[in-house]
Amino acid sequence: MVKLGLTRLLKSRLLRGLEVGAILNPTSVDPELRHLADLLHEAEGVALAALFGPEHGVRGDVQYLEEVGAAKDPRTGVPEHSLYGKDFASLTPKDAHLVGLDALVFDIQDVGSRYYTYLATMGLAMQAAAKHKLPFVVLDRPNPIGGLSVEGGIVHPGFESFVGLWPVAARHGLTAGEYARFVNQKIGADLKVIPMRN
């Protein structure tokens, strides 16, 4: 049985004593379908200080192409900040929302294609973390279409968009953790990938 990065993180002491921000959505669950926001909120010695919701929001209750607003998570009471809106600037964590944090955690299931926006969100958040000298922790998950095939063209300079910010193929063949390591060669964040096991 595959052990997710999330499962391995919760058994570690990596976030003990830290004020943490989490970038997550409805796929951010453990094998018992418990959401990462709830798990971090209940974790001993961890202060969950902020939630960052990409397209569709933290709990997935925002419609397609709708702007995600700032709010408080109804289950934990933790402030939610949007990473999706009407312009490119809205896709990156704002400086004010990172003040006081000790680390950012990313845990979202990808589909294996760069047209899915969540790994672009991850890369933009990594840039913000690097700017603020915050450790960036990626909880790895499987690539559901596998890692053996890479297909399609890469994004060339001058043609970047939210569905193609880095020079990767359309079917990139990477997990989120591998993708983070690849783009971090240009970003230079303090990156920690919690790999899967088995």
Image (cartoon, grey):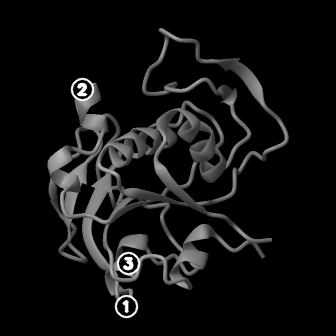
Q: Are marks 1 and 2 in contact (CB under 8 Å)?
A: no
**Disc 1/disc 2 C-alpha distance (Å):** 38 Å
Q: Earlier in the sequence, mark 3 or mark 2?
A: 3
State the image coordinates of residue 158 (x, y, percent, origin top left). Answer: 47, 8
Q: Secondary structure at mark 1?
A: loop
State the image coordinates of residue 113 (x, y, percent, origin top left). Answer: 63, 35
**Disc 3/disc 1 C-alpha distance (Å):** 8 Å
User: Is residue 69 in sight in this rendering?
Assistant: no
State the image coordinates of residue 126 (x, y, percent, origin top left). Answer: 42, 45
So how many labels did they put on this image?
3
In this view, which residue lies farthest toward the right? 148
Q: Quadrant of residue 112?
A: top right
Q: Quadrant of residue 127?
A: top left
User: Where is mark 3, residue-wise?
Assistant: 40
Q: How packed is label 1: few (under 14 Cα within 10 Å), some, or many (20 or more)? A: few
Q: How packed is label 3: few (under 14 Cα within 10 Å), some, or many (20 or more)? A: many
In this view, which residue lies farthest toward the top? 158
Q: Nearer the viewer, residue 69 or 98?
A: 98
Q: Amino acid at mark 1?
A: Glu
User: Where is mark 1, residue-wise?
Assistant: 44
User: Is residue 75 in sight in this rendering?
Assistant: yes
**In the image: residue 81, left or right of residue 92:** left
Q: Secondary structure at mark 2?
A: loop
Q: Amino acid at mark 3?
A: Leu
User: Where is mark 2, residue-wise?
Assistant: 87
